[in-house]
Image (cartoon, grey):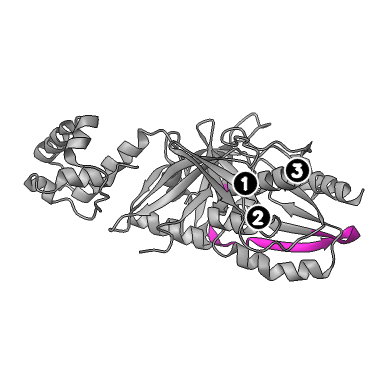
Amino acid sequence: MNKLSQKIFISLLIFVSFSAGFVVNGFINSSDSKKKITGLVNLNIGSKNEIEKKADFDIFWDAWRIVEDKYNLEPLDYQEMVYGAIEGMVYSLRDPYTVFLDPEESEVFDEDMKGSFSGIGAEIGFRDKLLTVIAPLEDSPAENAGILSGDKILKVDGEEIFGMSIDKAVNLIRGEKGTKVLLTIAREGLDELKDIEIVRDTIIIKTIEWEIKENNIAYLKISQFKEDTTFELDDKIGEILAIDPRGIIIDLRNNAGGYVHTVKEVSGRFLDRGEVVFIEDHSDGETIHKATGDKRFFDVSIVVLINEGSASASEILAGALRDNMGVKLVGKKTFGKGSVQEVKYLKDGSSIKITVAEWLTPNRTVINNNGVEPDFEVEMSFEDYENDRDPQLEKAMELLIF
């Protein structure tokens, strides 16, 4: 089984629970048509009698038999019918982050989380029921073509995508290196829709970058919380400590999230072991997540940069540093994606990415749909972006110098 199968992540990466188990319990030893269903795993979530108390499952099989008996335009693909049923059930949850991925989509998701894939290089999520660019990746085809955080994607190659799941929309947007895709976007401040053509390319993500700024201030950019982000950070920590920095600016702008275990490890480089990073709020109680690893930064002032593209795991780190250490946040209110997804793999290679909880900061601030408010709100205008000005970074520098 893929090593991601038991890992929980918090992310807006594009990359239900039909409860395949109870469907299988209904399929096995039932009828000839049911025996044609293959590739699902029995999750042992309850007996047939228990399920029948919760829903009238007979109507599903009535509908199945009607399709099987009456549809004659082309041969039926029974596995696709199962996948379609699962997608329909998941859609009824009205949770854009709970999705069913068929084997091909599941493989793409795995590739994305490893940090290398082919596409346009942008994180997207839902805001106000519209597919929204959370953040273009640095120096990506999306950024170079002029895509900005907050852009609403309305069409892909002329096809309207309203009501489409994130994963389905992403399948339209991504593609082979060198091919083109046309996005029709709505942007705040523009009176009309804008078409942007993007040439797809291979996207390789380096999640940690740093440099020395004036007055001996270390600038640390964390772009995502991937599998190897902690290793990348540990590789750079010695270099940062060697300059004995006056302060550290942690830039989480346009960081759309990543794995739970990674953000706990990264937090542990700044917090004492055991300090609370975040709280998972389940229907059956709470789980406290604490910093892991060895603290490496002592007696150094820290400022964190955030913006509308900071989401999920980056919101966790920002909240943990502020609640535990009083670290100041500079920029704009974050995206507000405070839910936790877990990936469960089925034996045919398909998977369910399912929301299992919401999270709170150590001081129990609810982030989902609210975001993290900065201590110092600083605008970053389109003109600033076009002219390589960064007033948010300038404010962070000011706080560390004085």
Which residues lie in the magenta part?
197-218
Residue found farthest to the left? 32
Q: Is residue 220 left or right of residue 34?
A: right
**N-terminal-most mark, 3 or 1:** 1
Q: Can you give x and y, in whole percent of width and height, for residue 39 in the image?
A: 23, 55
Res. 310 visible in picture: no
Q: Which mark is residue 329?
A: 3
The image quadrant that residue 334 belongs to is top right
Q: Can you give x and y, in whole percent of width and height, for residue 290 in the image?
A: 60, 52
In-front residue for pair 313/67: 313
Secondary structure beneath dot 1 equals helix
Q: Main secondary structure of the magenta part?
A: strand
Judge the density around disc 3: few (<14), some (14-19), many (≥20) Cα neighbours within 10 Å.
Answer: many
Identity, as a three-letter code, of the amino acid under mark 1: Ile
Secondary structure beneath dot 2 equals helix
Q: Residue at x 19, y 54 (%)?
A: 38
Q: Residue at x 48, y 43 (%)?
A: 156
Identity, as a three-letter code, of the amino acid under mark 2: Ser
Is the C-beta separation of discs 2 and 1 under 8 Å? yes
Q: Which mark is residue 267?
A: 2
Q: Is residue 346 left or right of residue 66?
A: right
Identity, as a three-letter code, of the amino acid under mark 3: Leu
**N-terminal-most mark, 2 or 1:** 2
Judge the density around disc 2: few (<14), some (14-19), many (≥20) Cα neighbours within 10 Å.
Answer: many
Per the model, the C-alpha gap separating discs 3 and 1 is 13 Å
Q: Which mark is residue 316?
A: 1
Per the model, the C-alpha gap separating discs 2 and 3 is 15 Å
Q: Is residue 398 left or right of residue 184?
A: right
Is the C-beta separation of discs 2 and 3 under 8 Å? no
Q: Residue at x 84, y 62 (%)?
A: 245
Judge the density around disc 1: few (<14), some (14-19), many (≥20) Cα neighbours within 10 Å.
Answer: many
